[in-house]
Image (tube, rainbow, N blue to C red):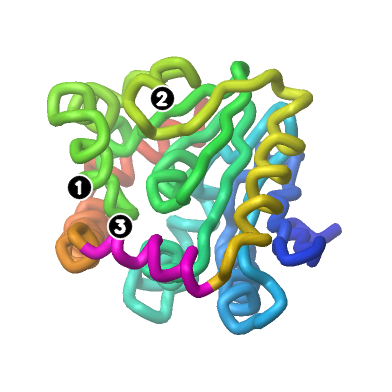
Amino acid sequence: MNEIVTRDIGHVLHIELNRPQAKNALSIEMYRELVEAFEYLDSSDNLHVGLIYGSTSCFSAGNDLKDFMNSSVLDDSHPTVKFIKLLANFSKPIVAAVAGPAVGIGTTMLLHCDMVIAANNSKFQLPFVQLGLCPEAGSSLLLPYMAGHPKAFEYLVLGKPFNADTALDMAMINQVVEPGDVINVASQIAETLSLLPVEAVIESKRLMKLPLRQVQNASIAQELGAFSSLLKSDECQKRVSSFFNK
């Protein structure tokens, strides 16, 4: 069974996270496949928009920690790093449909999407510090930018879960819908975007992202350095081992 399923539908590339037995936790192989999917979207003249989603009950439980802890060093060749940098600098619009758990990278990747539709059963959480780690994927910059420092600190450092209504209040998402509607609503938005003048959409996105782009990439680089160092620490190893032993 493919764990990343892609479909060309009109001018939209549908990217489905399809690992239900692990709550769509992202393995290293899934990151490789995500990179391939986004590179395909980027290179296609027929595809204008990306749409990423899980199921109506689960978006993603975050990284597959066991796979992640056994992977290679977090440099530019690492599939996770490739995916984060590709998504952060992507030129075509990305729409996300979220339902159920969206943990760690399952939340931070949404900060790079252009529109996010969330079901009212969504549960967002950023438990990096609880694992002895730090924020990643530019979230240390983007979440304070969206929500302000106090709220961002509450969710990035305390790791407090929050729901779709809170995400809407923080301007992280565009709309809250019923779980059964989330993929259809996001698909309709993606289709509408895909029929707009392509270059005008891409240029508009570029201009809107421009003020943050340079500092965002610097932030991602700083996060990766800190994350890599913390990943090797005794405290992180102890906390991750405790997580597996629960």
Q: Is residue 95 above or below residue 12?
A: above
Q: Which residue is disc 1 drawn over?
A: 141
Q: Which mark is residue 167?
A: 2
Q: Magenta part mainly helix, strand or loop? A: helix
**Which residue does the numbered mark 3 point to in the structure image?**
208
Q: Say whether residue 47 is visible.
A: yes
Q: Marks 1 and 3: CB-CB under 8 Å?
A: no
Looking at numbered disc 1 in the image, what kind of residue is underneath it?
Leu
Earlier-in-chain disc, 2 versus 3:
2
Q: Which residues are magenta?
A: 199-210
The crowd level at tag 1 (other Cα within 10 Å; few <14, some 14-19, many 20+) is many
Q: Is residue 95 magenta?
A: no
- Quadrant assignment, res 168: top left
State which tag comes first along the sequence, 1 or 3. 1
Q: Secondary structure at mark 2?
A: helix
Quadrant hosting residue 104:
top left
Residue 205 colored magenta? yes
